[in-house]
Image: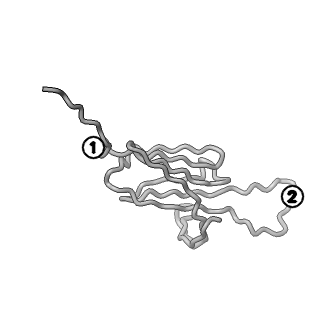
Amino acid sequence: MNERKEFVVEQDGRSKEQRPANLPAVDIFEDATGVTVLADLPGVTKDRLNIKVESEMLVIEGEASVPVPADVRLVHGELREPLFRRSFRLGPEFDKDAITASLKYGVLTLQVPRIREAQPRQIPVTVA
């Protein structure tokens, strides 16, 4: 089950409100070239997803849309458009300018590569 926390959320670029946000479940894989982050963001579309790097923090924010058919009237609603927010501290070995993101079937995939100098490399041995 996703954990919920209260965050100050900017609405329409001006006003701010405090509202609960879900911490999306993530899987993180690491190899020599960097890390891959898979985040579960059900109902979040590309236009309602914001991924940014602020200083050393990688921040994922998304809001799911809850479609209501035009021919029905909502009588009681407890499910507000869910907000997802998660952040991770990036170390200096990661190339913050080369992060890539893709969204498919509600799963966000982030590729966070290491800077070239931080990647392990094989040193060839020559026989003299």
Does 31 appear above or below 70? above
Disc 2 crowd, CA 10 A, few/some/many (<14, 14-19, 20+): few
* Quadrant location of the N terminus in the rendered image: bottom right
The C terminus lies in which quarter of the figure? Answer: top left
CB-based contact (under 8 Å), mark 1 and mark 2: no
Residue 35 drawn at (x, y percent): 44, 48
Q: At which x and y percent is residue 103?
A: 59, 45
Disc marking residue 117: 1
Q: Residue at x 32, y 44 (%)?
A: 115
Q: Position of residue 123 (x, y in %)?
A: 24, 35
How many discs mark residues in the rendered view?
A: 2
Disc 1 marks a residue whose amino acid type is: Glu
Helix or strand or loop: what does disc 1 sit on?
helix
Please tell me which residue is depicted at 52% across the width and 65% down the height of the picture.
14
Q: CA distance from mark 1 to mark 2?
A: 58 Å
Q: Nearer the viewer, mark 1 or mark 2?
A: 1
The image quadrant that residue 11 belongs to is bottom right
Disc sitting over residue 34 in the figure = none
Q: Is residue 18 above or below residue 116?
A: below
Which disc number belongs to residue 72?
2
Residue that extends furthest to the top in the rendered view of this protein: 128
Residue 118 location in percent, x, y? Answer: 30, 46
Q: Nearer the viewer, residue 55 or 48?
A: 55
Q: Say which residue appears at 32% left-offset and 51% top-offset.
A: 93
Crowding at label 1, few (<14), some or many (≥20) Cα neighbours within 10 Å?
A: few
Q: Quadrant of residue 6?
A: bottom right
* Local SS, label 2: loop
